[in-house]
Image (cartoon, helix red, strand yellow):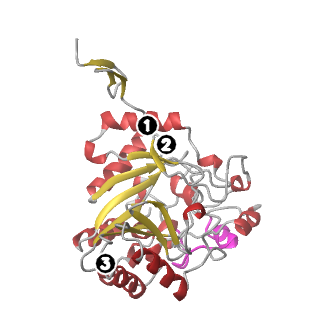
């Protein structure tokens, strides 16, 4: 067994990127998957391969990363840009949806390719690529020209696929913009390629006068291998604040015990639970989606089960570029000084009492 409960795979420690490699590793029979590979990138890192139990057809790690024919099924409500990034992109690589923060998408490749990815039409070897020098200049120039921008969020793609030298260069440029105070990275790397998180990488994420946050994306407790835990510790000990992001996925974490274990694992590794995303309407991902009512019931059940330290916000990205909304079931209703409050077990209580 591999660390975290998966089955160790034999063979070279290199990413699996082709259908034939999945077949050789015993992760798929490959039937019909060339059509999936023609549409969406495949990538499974050695660390992830070691977690997968190929004998378990319902393995939650495999479900996240191994392609299936379900991805060829699209529904009428799915869209190539489900959260409307392009609607708010004034220059290449920038998404400016909210007044005080922007996304900086410096790169559109990842160390792994999640089968539920909401940017799956944009990422991968055939995706939008890495920003060119002039494109990065224009993106940084846009940030410098907009004093309302307080936070820059590096995403993509996965920004931690860049070398420490490249990351340090970007951080140095942001350090020269006085109104930017917060730099945030969104990444899977500490979980799927923990060996990349070395001293050079941690140092590259820091810059004078800026506070660095890093959102660690994980969806199942088994992803917290000893190597992943050590990578997170290096980041925290190096002065990087860690928060979490997860996606609520059918067949991966859509039961309260699994979700509670995931959130506790974050807290135990000094990662503050932040967002639990409702699955986006990305093409070929309907088999991952739960209903909003199911999600609300799960996050309500979490309230009574685990510490407040381990509670994420349940979020929906409104299609069309309208931003995020918190969609956890409201616990209070009423008005004019009289309210009904629902407790974690479903009981209702008047407030004020009597």
Q: Main secondary structure of the magenta part?
A: loop
The earlier-in-sequence mark between 1 and 3 is: 3
Q: Position of residue 99 (x, y in %)?
A: 42, 60
Calculate the distance from the C-alpha at mark 1 to the C-alpha at mark 3: 35 Å
Dividing the image into 4 quarters, which one contains the N terminus? bottom left
Residue bearing the label numbered 3: 202
| Residue underneath mark 2 | 254
The answer to whether residue 203 is above or below residue 188 is: below
Residue at 51% across, 49% down: 252
Neighbour class for label 1 at 10 Å: few (<14), some, many (≥20)?
many
Dot 1 falls on a residue whose secondary structure is: helix
Residue 127 located left or right of residue 135: right
Residue at the extreme top: 354
The picture places residue 245, in percent across and down from the top left corner, at: 41, 56
Labels 1 & 2 near each other (Cβ < 8 A)? yes
Q: CA distance from mark 1 to mark 2?
A: 8 Å
Label 3 – label 2 distance at C-alpha: 33 Å
**Which disc number belongs to residue 298?**
1
157 or 258, nearer to the observer? 157
Q: Tell me if 25 is positioned left or right of 345 in this view.
A: right
Circle 3: element type: helix
For discs 1 and 2, the disc positioned in front in the rendered view:
1
Sequence-wise, the earlier of marks 3 and 2 is: 3
Crowdedness of circle 2 by 10 Å Cα count: few (<14), some, many (20+)? some
Q: Callout 3 environment at 10 Å: few (<14), some (14 to 19), or many (20+)?
A: many
Q: Give the magenta range.
A: 9-26
Position of residue 131 in the picture relative to residue 266 (left or right): right
């Amino acid at each position: 067994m591999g660390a975290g409960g998966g089955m160790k795979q034999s063979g070279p420690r290199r990413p699996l990127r082709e259908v034939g490699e999945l077949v050789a590793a015993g992760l798929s029979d490959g039937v019909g998957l060339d059509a999936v590979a023609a549409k969406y990138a495949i990538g499974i890192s050695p660390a992830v391969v070691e977690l997968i139990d190929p004998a378990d057809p319902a393995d939650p790690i495999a479900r996240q990363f191994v392609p299936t024919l379900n991805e060829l099924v699209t529904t009428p409500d799915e869209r190539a840009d489900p959260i409307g990034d392009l609607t708010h992109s004034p220059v290449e690589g920038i998404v400016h949806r909210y007044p005080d923060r922007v996304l900086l998408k410096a790169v559109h490749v990842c160390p792994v390719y999640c089968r539920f990815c909401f940017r799956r039409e944009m990422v991968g070897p055939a995706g939008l690529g890495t920003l060119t020098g002039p494109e990065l200049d224009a993106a940084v120039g846009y940030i410098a020209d907009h004093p309302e921008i307080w936070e820059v969020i590096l995403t993509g793609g996965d920004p931690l696929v860049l070398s420490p030298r490249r990351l340090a260069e970007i951080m140095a440029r942001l350090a020269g913009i006085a109104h930017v105070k917060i730099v945030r990275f969104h990444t899977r790397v500490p979980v799927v390629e923990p060996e990349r998180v070395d001293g050079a990488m941690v140092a590259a994420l820091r810059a004078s006068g800026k506070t660095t946050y890093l959102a660690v994306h994980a969806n199942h407790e088994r992803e917290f291998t000893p190597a992943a835990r050590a990578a997170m510790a290096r980041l925290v000990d190096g002065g990087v604040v860690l928060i979490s992001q997860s996606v609520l996925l059918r067949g991966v974490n859509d039961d309260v015990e699994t979700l509670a274990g995931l959130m506790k694992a974050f807290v135990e590794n000094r990662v503050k639970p932040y967002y639990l995303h409702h699955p986006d309407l990305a093409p070929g991902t309907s088999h991952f989606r739960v209903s909003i009512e199911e999600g609300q019931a799960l996050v309500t059940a979490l309230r009574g089960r685990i510490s407040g330290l381990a509670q994420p916000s349940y979020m929906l990205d409104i299609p069309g570029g309208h931003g995020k909304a918190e969609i956890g079931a409201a616990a209070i209703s009423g008005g004019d000084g009289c309210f009904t409050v629902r407790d974690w077990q479903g009981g209702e209580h008047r407030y004020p009492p009597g």
